[in-house]
Amino acid sequence: MGIIAAIILGLLQGIAEFLPVSSSGHLLLFQYFFEIERGGMLFDIILHVATLFAVIVVYRKRLRLLLTWKMVIATAITCIFVLLFKNLIDKTFNIKFLPFAFMLTAVVLILPSLIKKNAASITTNHNNDGKDIPKRKKIPPEYIMGLAQGIAVVPAFSRSGFTITAGQLAGMERTEAADFSFLMSIPIILASLLYEIISGGGFGSIEPLPMIIGFIAAFLSGIFAIKFMLTIIKKIDLRWFSLYLFALSITLFVLFF
């Protein structure tokens, strides 16, 4: 693997890991169209460690939140889901599956705004006719976000997009859901790295310099992506990212089918 390829893959991993557009999907696309090998499991681990460090740097003053039962529950649900459906998930690592997955991610990102509009309409009708609306018992956000994180292991399903959306649907504010989503990535990245090391068939081979360059690119772009998301999510919701994903999905449908 050359240095340019390592830089691009590192940038894709760092940026798309935290923006709601899917790092795994974009990495697969880039490798497919430019016929670039990723450098084996070792390079994957290097990139994931870089994004892990990015989260730690940004949230270094709030890492105590990881010690809560909510984080433990969310991580446990993610791990159980992935282990139960691993064989099915492995079958989705197909380039022609990506257009469908990107499209579904786009739909997921617009769900909170659609549900919010529907809720506003119901509230208006309630005010008009005076009828009481029965209250439903809410599922704790960590349960839904943990499940969403497990589902988002599928390539082109955005981990941040699915988990932030899940948090919003569970009643959390966007910024609160984003904070929990990014912090959730720390234990699950550690768990996935441990699993890959234990069950992997080999680390592959790659020169030290591309690994170092890829790490730096993923680390710096990851910090930028997290701070960008935390800033922009206060002003707009995730449905604006769905426009890009819809366009990408349609383009891939045309190219592949």
Image (cartoon, rainbow, N blue to C red):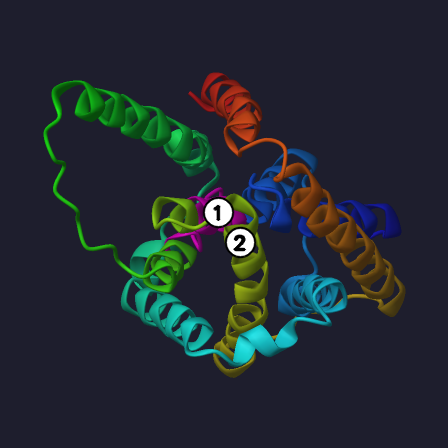
Which of the pair 121/230 is nearer the observer? Answer: 121
> Is residue 38 in view from this perspective?
yes
What mark, if any, has residue 173 been given in the picture?
1
Q: Residue at x 38, y 54 (%)?
A: 148
Q: Which residue has dot 2 on it?
A: 176
Query: Is the C-beta separation of discs 1 and 2 under 8 Å?
Result: yes
Q: Position of residue 102 (x, y in %)?
A: 46, 33
Q: Secondary structure at mark 1?
A: loop
Q: Quadrant of residue 60?
A: bottom right
Amino acid type indicated by mark 2: Glu
Q: Residue at x 22, y 26 (%)?
A: 122
Q: Residue at x 66, y 71 (%)?
A: 62
Amino acid type indicated by mark 1: Glu
Q: Residue at x 33, y 57 (%)?
A: 144
Q: Is residue 67 left or right of residue 218?
A: left
Q: Position of residue 9 (x, y in %)?
A: 73, 49
Q: Position of residue 99 (x, y in %)?
A: 45, 30
> Quick check: is 205 in the magenta stretch?
no
Q: Position of residue 237 (x, y in %)?
A: 54, 33
Which of the pair 187/233 is nearer the observer? Answer: 233
Q: Is residue 150 depicted above or below 64 in this figure?
A: above
Where are the magenta residues, as a range? 151-165
What mark, if any, has residue 197 been given in the picture?
none
Q: Is residue 59 depicted above or below 241 in this figure?
A: below
